[in-house]
Image (cartoon, grey):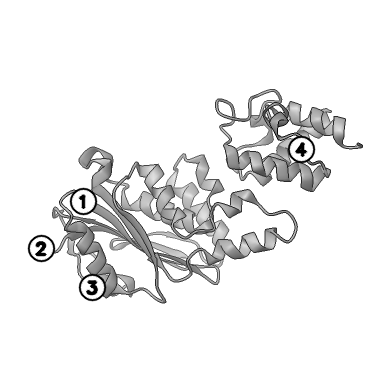
Amino acid sequence: MEELIAKLKLQIIEALNLKHLKPEDIVDDQPLFVDGLGLDSIDALELIVLLQQHYNIKIAKPEEGSKIFSSVRSIATYIQAHQNN
Amino acid sequence: MASDPYITQFVRVVHDQVQNNDRIIFEKQSVPLDTFLTDWYTQLGSNYPKFFKMDRQSKLGFLATEILLDQRQLAGEYSSESVGIILSNAQASLDTDQRYFESAKTFPSPGLFVYTLPNIVAGEISIRHKIKGETAFFVSASFDAEWMASYVSLVMTNPTTQACIAGWVDIKDQQADVLLYLTEKKKEKGSLVHNSAILDQLYKKELWKS
């Protein structure tokens, strides 16, 4: 899990053009939207693309998006649960 | 008839050199445009993380405006509604259109897609500087000093409009070509008259502000 989280942070920085951040600036359980990293709706779409591109995972239920993308750890948990399905 | 407004600041970017009025303020030779823009941003010391999300045209407009307004607090001098933005270029958003087209061959990037309109650069400048005045973006084959002087002067005849950020923000073949200027109704020290002859000379780098 920790390895996946570290990899995800690098991928998020690259995909979302967060060039002002280093992986260690993103706390595992920190909210990604609004108060946390301050991501917006376009970033949410980029995260969906990231999951599809790197992990071949499509979000089946869009209404689950806010829960899945609440933090880097929650994304990693979702990937682990769905990668081999 | 109202008198011509004044050009109180200008920024000229050609390829790898940035000029503000009569001074060269940044130069980076033989580097890719992305590197040029990031290094320019770093030199400015601005703290605006959204810069990294912008496309190259928006970065160019953003950085040039940072220089243009460096010594000024427009928000303190003018109401948001009294400052306009009138921009033009030849390539529209082609630089980003092509990058989005490439990304669409595999996974289309939403972050690129939102920049596939030329007027987004005006939006980014508006957000940064809280500008809500008249805004327009035009596409023409080349920089047209006569048209630019005429249109911007017309906008400045509006009693509400007190200042306008105007000019040319273009990227062609990975090269920047920018003439951005601040025009105001009130004369500042060293101001130039806003007319087509002056704009033509500024674009051709034939005239430095004295």
Q: Chain of mark 4?
A: A
Going from N to C along the chain, the mark reached first, 3 or 1, is 1
- Which one is nearer the viewer's eye here, A13 or B117? B117
Chain ID, mark 1? B
Mark 4 vs mark 1: in front: 4
Count every numbered label the image shows and give the total. 4
The circle on residue A75 is: none
Establish whether labels 3 and 1 are both on one chain.
yes
Residue B161, labelled with which disc? 1
CA separation in Å, label 4 and label 3: 55 Å
Q: Quadrant of the C terminus of chain A?
A: top right
Name the residue tied to disc 4: A59
Residue B45, position in %: x, y? 45, 43
- Disc 3 element: helix
- Is disc 2 in contact with disc 1, using a CB cutoff of under 8 Å? no
Say whether marks 3 and 2 touch (CB < 8 Å).
no
Q: Residues within 10 Å of mark 3 (few under 14, many from 20)?
A: some
- Residue named by callout 2: B3
Instruction: Name the chain letter of the residue that bears numbered label 2.
Output: B
**Badge 2 or badge 1: first in the primary sequence:** 2
Residue B73 visible at all: no
Q: Nearer the viewer, mark 4 or mark 3?
A: 4
Q: Position of residue B169 (x, y in %)?
A: 41, 63
